Amino acid sequence: MPPPQKIRLGDMLIEQGLLTMEQLKLALEEQKRTGRKLGRVFVESGYVTEEGISKALAHQLRAPFVDLRNFTPRPELIKLLPEAPARRFRALILDQLPDGRLQVGMSDPTDLQAYDEITRVLKRDIEQAVVTESQLLGLIDRVYHRGEQITGLAKELTAELGDTPIEFGELLGTAPGAEDAPVVKLLQTVFEEAVRLRASDIHFEPQEKSLRIRFRIDGVLHIQTEADAKVSSAVALRLKLMSGLDISEKRLPQDGRFGIKVRANPLDVRISTLPTQYGESIVMRLLSQNTGMLGLDKMNMPPRVLERFRHALKRPSGMVLVTGPTGSGKTTTLYAALNELNSPEKKLITVEDPVEYRLPGLNQVQVHEKIDLSFARVLRTVLRQDPDIVLIGEMRDQQTAEIGMRAAMTGHLVLSTLHTNDAMSTPIRLLDMGVPRYMVALSVHMIVAQRLVRVICANCSERYMPTPNEHEWLRYELGGEADQHTYQHGRGCAHCANTGYQGRSGVYEFLEMSDALVEAINDDDPSVFMRAAREQMAGETLRRDAVRLVLAGKTTIAEAMRISNQFEE
């Protein structure tokens, strides 16, 4: 294929009937005013789609158009073009042709400089294919893993450390040229890769002969690399300095936080250190400040759960609890509720540790145990601030629970979370904490329990035949109906890092404190309440909601079974 020639984009689109002269005139005026690329102006003005432009270019150049949404890259070919030129020239190697040429996907196949530079780097003849820029950049983010770069930086740090003492100034970032120090570059790359992979947590785990770095993605841990054990103390020291922890204390656990920017994305990082046999284990929870606020309509609640949850939120007083283990999305659900309740006529106050979301109109208080700003102490003051709605981040002890319940009994709507396995065991857990029975009976109105299951990747979803074990589980849940459905799973692709999953969705159950349940909670025998709660729920459990997602093709049987094993019905 000959080198590309310059094409007047506007004229080409008019010629193919995708654009009018008037639209071209308006777009050129907008381009002159803003300096943006003409193609981007066309797309953002709604004159033509990005895919429409790419297909038009492909038609004009007699080149193939490749839809990257269903494309499976070949790693051995991808590596031939380094990440830097791939990003700079918006190009990616797609295939090797029978004649030995490489097919290269480009978002701008008319770029002569990019064509020449790519040919020089590859030292091979190439054939151009046309791809959309957004799909290309997304695929570049997914296929150029930085695991090897992280390993290389860790080795560089190991070599630099040797047997010499660690320079505090360098690790702190105050020494000249410290931004180029291996420990700084290592951590920067780790954070960038974690953000790219949508990781919620980063784990640095010292082993006998190595430092293991793992990311938690969609609730599951994945190993990123194994570094030399010498790196452990340098990484721990740097992170402790960043979060203001005591660098001389290595025998006791410590907790802290710090803020950083990664790819212009502000992150609030919560850090926890734990002394282990081979050094300090460090776990960091990443909280993005740019995360869009979800509404209750987008939480994937079953219609009946959503209806009753909204009904409970309309009450002027009482307590609504969302329960589940750490990382099950409880705070996200509560903030979706606050987003609906937030209005100029109501005063909303939150008491949290930490404040995970920023929502305009709320009065958000950060608990700080080190200065004795505890949940209980803040709550006492909050109730003198004349709130209508109070969110308690977590009811961790009897004192906090009792203050929250008194507020719920005296004209406030109180929202909070609790760590329990399911909805029906929550009132029993409150009694175990020492909360008086009458408080639980009079204040708690609704309990929502939830879990998160991984969602099948839309790009590699395919029909799946259940294993004998899975089939038996389905028959237990659905009876003879199990054989009447088809099931899906993800085979694994570049879009989901070959996991078969991308993203997570909630599964829910709820329990409303009816008169019968209020009477049952006053019985000294917990089984009386559990039996009454089970009758009221009538099988609408977390497990059954997970089955709903399986039948809808949104998650796998294995995922439904996994979350089902976390509790007993």
Image (cartoon, rainbow, N blue to C red):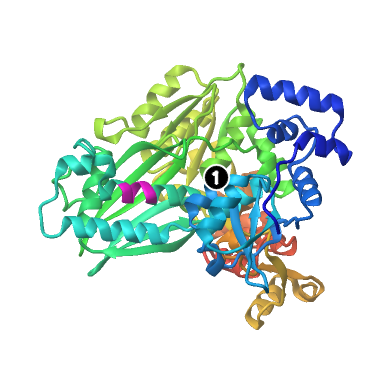
The image shows residue 566, relative to residue 387, as above or below, that is: below
User: Could you tell me which residue is drawn at 73 percent across and 42 percent down?
Assistant: 50
Instruction: Pinpoint residue 274: horizontal percent, then vertical percent.
Output: 26, 54
**Quick one: quadrant of the N terminus?**
bottom right
The residue that disc 1 covers is 322
User: Could you tell me which residue is drawn at 38 percent across and 50 percent down?
Assistant: 189
The furthest residue to the bottom: 468
Q: Is residue 319 left or right of residue 471?
A: left
Residue 187: within the magenta? yes
SS for callout 1: strand
Instruction: Pinpoint residue 291: horizontal percent, then vertical percent.
Output: 54, 38
Q: Could you tell me if residue 189 is visible in this image?
A: yes
Q: Could you tell me if residue 444 is visible in this image?
A: no
User: Magenta region: which residues?
Assistant: 185-189
Instruction: Pinpoint residue 111: horizontal percent, then vertical percent.
Output: 63, 44
* Nearer to the camera, 190 or 161: 161
Main secondary structure along the magenta-highlighted residues: helix
Q: Quadrant of residue 471?
A: bottom right
Q: Is residue 222 left or right of residue 477?
A: left
Q: Amino acid at mark 1?
A: Val
The image shows residue 319, relative to residue 560, as above or below, that is: above
Q: Quadrant of residue 341?
A: top right
**Quick one: quadrant of the C terminus?**
bottom right
Residue 35: within the magenta? no
* Nearer to the camera, 377 or 146: 146
Specify few, some or many for label 1: CA neighbours under 10 Å numbering under 14, 14-19, or 20 or more.
Answer: many
Q: Quadrant of residue 496?
A: bottom right
Count of numbered marks = 1
